[in-house]
Amino acid sequence: MKNIYSGLLLMFLSSVFYGQNVITWCYQNNNSFDGITHHHSFLLGDLMTDSIAESEYYEVDYLNNIYLVANVRVDSTGKVYAKFLDCDTEIPEVLLYDYSLEVGDTMFYDYGGYPPGHIYEFDHYKVVVGKENLFFDGKNHRRLLLESHGGYYYESDFHEWVEGYGSLISRGFLNPVEIDGILNGDSYSFNCVLENGTPVFSPANCYCNPHDNIDGLIVREPEISISNFTVMVESDESYLAEIFDITGKLLHKEFVNGSFKYNLQKSGAGLFFIRLSGNDFVVSKKFVVKS
C-alpha cells in the first residue's frame, strides 16, 4: 500500500476544511498485547445519494501513517461503491452499501476479508431486518439494520447503516466487507462518527487516536484557526509546532511557548497539516489553502 503521509498524527475532532466535507469514523481496538487504543479513518467528500463527485477514503494505521485506500462514489439509488487502490489481488469496484433495500431483502457480497489491504473473493451476505428514516441537518437519512452471515464479525452479527455515514459498528466505513478475524488479539468496537469535526453518532466519548486518554484525563488542547494563508494557535502551553505539506514534507518546525502564527503564502495553495506536541497532548489539524 502506498504511504503518502508518514508519521502524521491527526485528530479530526477539530478538522478545518474549506469547501470540503470530512467524515471521520473513530473506533477502539482492545488488543490482548497492547491494551486499549483508539484509531480512525476518514473520507473526503460526501456519502449522500447523488453525490456530485467521487470521494476519497483514507485509513490511518497503528504508526499514524495515512493511506489513500479507495475512491468512493454513490449513485442515484443509494448504492455506495468503492474502488480499492491497493489490495493483495486486483479486484473490481465493490458495492459496499445499498440503501434502496427493504426489510427482508438480502445484500450479497462476492468479496471480503480484512480491509483495506486484504480483500479477496469470499461469498457472504446480509439480510435487512429493519428500516426507518432519520431526519436531521435538513436531510432524510435511510437507516438500515442488517443481520450478517458467512463471516467473522468483531462486534456483532447485527450491523447498522445510516445513509451518508455508512456503518456504525466495528471500524466503520469498510465494515460491510470486514469478515476475517486476525490472530493477534485485535477486537474492534465502534466509537463515533464525526462530520467536519462535529460528532454525529456518538454512543460513547468520541476518542479518535492513540493519544486520546481513556481514563478521563482532560487534555489541554491549543486552539487552532486558519485565516487566508495564516495558521494561528492560541495556547498558554509550551509545545513543538510542525507544519507539513500534502507529501509529508516538513515546512516549518518551532518550539513555542504560548501563541503561534505561521504564514503559508510562499507555499501556495494546497492541503497542509499542523501538528502540536506538548507534554500531555498531541493535536493535529488539516486544512486547505486556496489561491
Image (cartoon, rainbow, N blue to C red):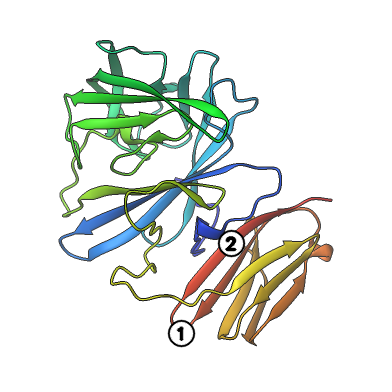
Q: Quadrant of residue 179?
A: top left
Residue 47 relative to residue 106: left or right: right
Residue 208 relative to residue 33: left or right: right
State the quadrant of the N terminus.
top left
Which element carries disc 1, helix, strand or loop? loop
Query: Taking 44 as reference, is 219 above or below it?
Result: below
Mark yes or no: residue 2 visible: no
Q: Amino acid at mark 1?
A: Asn
Q: Quadrant of residue 153?
A: top left
The numbered dot on residue 285 is 2
Q: What x and y, as percent, mark residue 151?
A: 17, 29
Mark yes or no: residue 277 visible: yes
Q: Residues within 10 Å of mark 1 (few under 14, many from 20)?
A: few
| Mark 1, residue position | 279
Which element carries disc 2, helix, strand or loop? strand
Q: What x and y, as percent, mark residue 100?
A: 41, 13
